[in-house]
Image (tube, grey):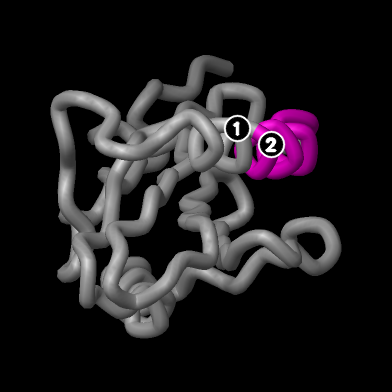
Amino acid sequence: MVIGAGACSQTVPSLPADPPPLARYSEYPFGTETRVREVDQQTRILAALKPRFPDVRLLPRMIPAGGDWTALGAAYQRALPGWKKLPIGGDDPDGWRFAFTDGSHVVTVAGLRRAADRATPVTIYTDLPS
């Protein structure tokens, strides 16, 4: 019995557009100390995600000075209807993070804690096409 490819395929959602206040940058705008902290955070999150989502990749972003990260989780939840929150490891004393999954794909957003008057590095971890 032959089953057509269309009967077994699912449409892969695409990555939602960056909600405010996320911004892209072309050159890393943070210092060495911040980069070390960010790489440490990225390493811990990748270790948690890679076993279940081996194709996850990192997308660098930032929140400009004065931006507030707290609304990002709600924005992604609205953009990914039906997706569930995904716990990612324990507490992160140096930053914040949230993750959503549909069971097959993941979108995780994480950033470092910084003073409100300073820009904040943010990383999106996903296996969704852009």
Instruction: Decide: few, some or many residues near mark 2? Use Cα within 10 Å; few <14, some 14-19, many ≥20.
Output: few
Q: Tell me the residue at 55%/37% (across/down).
A: 33
Of the two numbered discs 2 and 1 in the rendering, the one whose residue sits closer to the viewer: 1
Q: Are marks 2 and 1 in contact (CB under 8 Å)?
A: yes
Judging depth in this view, the residue of 95 and 9 nearest the camera is 95
| Disc 2: which residue | 40
| Disc 1: which residue | 36
Is disc 2 placed on a helix, strand or loop? helix
Q: Is residue 78 visible?
A: no
Q: Residue furthest right?
A: 90
Q: Tell me the residue at 35%/38% (across/down).
A: 30
As shown in the figure, which amino acid type bears the numbered disc 1? Val
Q: CA distance from mark 2 to mark 1?
A: 6 Å
User: Residue 49 location in percent, x, y?
Assistant: 70, 40
Magenta region's main secondary structure? Answer: helix
From what the image shows, is residue 120 above or below residue 28? below
As shown in the figure, which amino acid type bears the numbered disc 2? Asp
User: Residue 117 location in percent, x, y?
Assistant: 28, 73
Residue 88 quadrant: bottom right
Is disc 1 placed on a helix, strand or loop? helix
From what the image shows, is residue 54 above or below residue 59? above
User: Residue 63 location in percent, x, y?
Assistant: 27, 60
Q: Tell me the residue at 19%/68% (across/down).
A: 21
Range of magenta residues: 40-51
In this picture, residue 24 sits left or right of residue 120: left
Q: Residue furthest top?
A: 2
Judging depth in this view, the residue of 18 and 105 nearest the camera is 18
From what the image shows, is residue 28 above or below residue 15? above
Residue 100 quadrant: bottom right
User: Quick check: is 52 in the magenta stretch?
Assistant: no
